[in-house]
Amino acid sequence: MTAEPRNIDNLIRYQVDSGVARITIDAAGQGNALAGDMRDRLAERFREASEDLAVRAVTLRGAGERHFCTGAALGGAQRPGPARPDDAPERTAGEVARLIRHGWQALIASILDCEKPVIAAVNGTAAGGGAQLALACDLVVMADTAKFIQVFVRRGIMPDAGGAYLLPRLVGMHRAKELMFLGDDCNAERAEHIGLVNRVVPAADLDATVDELAQRFTMLPTKAIALTKRLANRSFESSREQCFDDEAIFQDLVATTADMKEGIAAFGERRDPQFRGW
């Protein structure tokens, strides 16, 4: 008997309400680990939120209380590849690299490239790729009971999902190497101390804190924030000349937005601006 295909949208829940796209990884029984089809749908949802003018902010959470995301699920549905010749080996050079590029790297890129601010609600353990998933977000709010684990070294492998790119930029090279080389648990207190997260709050207050932040973004100039995000994300790879050039070009783009016109008008009229997001 053929198994019924699972509904991926029950595992990657997506809801837009009052300007906020709320994404929940709903596989609490499996530590909210991402099988290939879940990972790919999650990336699709970030791209969808980026394009949707009704969305002003995005939140990301894991279902339940124990896990935010524990990385890649063993097994699970994967994107089918092309047919292989009968005499082909099980694996050829370049196939693992291709899987990484089209899989977890594409997911992390979908967050970094999302034109809306993304807030991670780290409700529980964020391990392996799940840690990078949170750290790629623009703001990270962490429950005081949660923890990060760069678990790769415990499995005899090296970090992926952009870990070696993200961590040094967040906490500096020495602390990043300590986290990746040793694979120790990083509790909420230490995560806040070394700059991995923006805020640590009691677990009972996590959702309310994240929702409050998200609602603030619904009242801010969305396009200006998108370009600020892009400029900041590029700054580590840019020379001073390039960064200044990007700043000038992006400022020119912002000057064409309705929100900038509203901001200038509101300033002159001494009233609060009413930003629309475009």
Image (cartoon, rainbow, N blue to C red):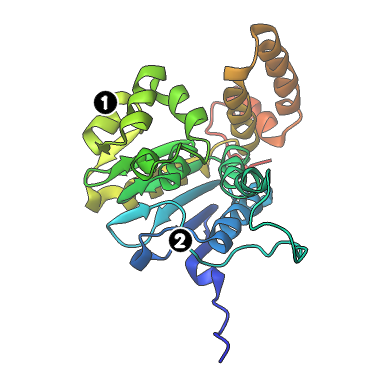
Instruction: Say which quadrant the N terminus sits in.
Output: bottom right
Q: Position of residue 242 (x, y in %)?
A: 70, 12
With respect to residue 179, does 251 lie above or below?
above
* Residue occupying the far top of the picture: 241
Q: Secondary structure at mark 1?
A: helix
- The location of residue 38, given as percent across then percent down, is 54, 61
Residue positioned 65% across, 35% down in the render? 223
Towards the viewer: 254 or 87: 87
- Amino acid, disc 1: His
In the image, what residue type sits under mark 2? Leu
Residue 22's place in the image compared with 169, above or below, is: below
Mark 2 lies on a secondary structure that is loop
Q: Position of residue 140 (x, y in %)?
A: 39, 38
In the picture provided, is 246 more to the left or to the right than 27? right
Q: Which residue is mark 1?
A: 193
The one of 99 and 262 positioned closer to us in this rendering: 99
* Residue carrying label 2: 74
Is 14 drawn above or below residue 180 in the view shown?
below
Task: Residue at 58%, 37% (x, y): give it.
Answer: 112
Q: Image check: 211 left or right of 226? A: left
Split into 4 quadrants, where in the image is the C terminus? top right
Q: Earlier in the sequence, mark 1 or mark 2?
A: 2
Answer few, some or many: residues within 10 Å of disc 2's Cα (few below 14, many 20 plus, some between 14 and 19): few
